[in-house]
Image: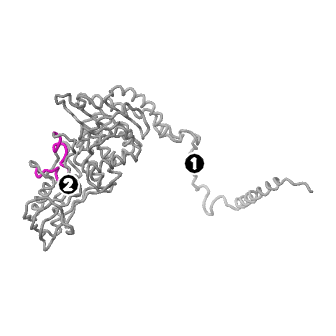
Amino acid sequence: MAPRRNPIPGLVVLALLPAALLGGCWRFADARTPSSAPGVSSASTNVVVAPAPLTTPLLSVRRTPSVLARDLSLSAFTAAANDFLPMIDSSSCMALSVDGMAVAAKNADVQLRPASNVKIITASVALEVLGADHVYTTEVHGTLQNGIVTGDLHLIGGGDPLLSSDWWHGPNTKYPPFNVTAIEALAQSISAAGVTSIAGSVVGDASRYDDEWYAPTWTSDVRFTEGGPISALLANDSREANDRSSNDPVVGAATVLTDALRAVGVSVAGAPSSGPAVAGEALIAEVKSQPLPAVLQEMLTTSDNNTAEMVLKEIGMKVSGRGSREAGLAAVMATLQSWGTPMEGVSLVDGSGLSDENRLTCGALLHVLQHDDASDAVGTGMPIAGVAGGTLSDAFVGTDLEGVLRGKTGTLYNYDDGTGGKPAAKALGGFLPLEGGGAVEFVMLLNGPQVAEKVVYRPIWDAFGALLLTYPAGPTPAVLGPR
């Protein structure tokens, strides 16, 4: 048998042949190419100078300067936060992160009164469940013949929490409602549809939601003045005029529309009332709210309890077909669980935080803030430090947080009733947007005697604001970038 030859030298020659042929073709083409195009002087050729190459290795941390800058600043921020933590006693909590990365926390799993910071959860879940394009629609139905509504005109509530007259400036003129849905616009639409008179009455229908006007855990001192009545048909927070409220929010809304119709020349024969709409009646006119982010902005900025409770019922309506507080809360808890929120210590009884029976932890609330974003409808809907019209208008004024920090406040005074009283609550949760993107997420729930009084909580807030301003402390991404 002939000895087997080694095939490797032959393979090498075959592999080199294409390269040799290409090299020869290149030399032939290069020899035939003139030094410049015919008729054009080589002196006129533009010379492009390439930028100096970066000397930073491809795998250097300088190739991710933003991450490097954050990591270098986090160490100093954590140290500053640890210096602040002694101000948080055993009856309060604080938790802090940067772009979702933990910085510091104290008592993060302790169950505490969150006050109106419950609205952060309501807003977050609403944005996910209802969607940013959700609008509320208020309709009027009836039988129209030759400009006359031959029977009653049925005003059907769609759960719009901001249905308002132009004279209504809210129960607290310091924080007036905005992004409202004008009742006058609905009256004008009815007139534009050809209605000149109504033979019967304006009859309100609030059947979209249940008839629980007040959460059972709300005490008598907060009912109506702070929250409620809650109804699928609610106008001007159940005020028929600046100096007159209604005993029934549905009749009150019908009264307000009756007055608005008469103001545009539509006559109404009967007195306002409430009752179910007639099946099959034609739609005559409607008015739509602004999209959900605008509603949430009003709710968060002014801490509107009625808006929060109506949004909660709408969540229930969307998920289960039941417009009730219980259905809304069930949907909220299920949504939080789906996000992986730590649920131990979370117990909610309303959507506004008005009840003293709500309980949250700083860990759970920070997780919800991390699920949100400083630039989404929740983050941008929050009050801004030092800006009029919101509940942070007088906070952090004169500091670098003014006009930048976005935070939801919360207050329960729980004044001593002679039996020892209940702990008061002062809450602050939100975002400090960072230049170049990202944000510091924070939550602080203060509970204790008199903690809702400015003289008690403001020194803690001021120290916390000073802490937030220590970030970032390291070099910027520009300094750390590739060279």
- Residue range highlighted in magenta: 221-241
Which quadrant holds the N terminus?
Answer: bottom right
Give the residue at x 10% y 63%: 201
Q: Is residue 436 magenta?
A: no
Q: Position of residue 413 (x, y in %)?
A: 21, 34
Instruction: Identify which residue, 220 or 402, lies in the foreground.
Output: 220
Instruction: Identify which residue, 109 or 289, lies in the foreground.
Output: 109
Instruction: Identify which residue, 440 or 112, lies in the foreground.
Output: 112
Instruction: Identify which residue, 13 or 308, lies in the foreground.
Output: 308
Residue, disc 2: 163
**Separation of residues labelled 1 and 2 (CA atoms):** 63 Å
- Magenta-drawn stretch, dominant element (helix, strand or loop): loop
Alpha-carbon neighbours of circle 2 within 10 Å: few (<14), some, or many (≥20)? Answer: many
Residue, disc 1: 50
Q: Earlier in the sequence, mark 1 or mark 2?
A: 1
Query: Hey, what amino acid is under mark 2?
Result: Leu
Which quadrant holds the C terminus?
Answer: top right
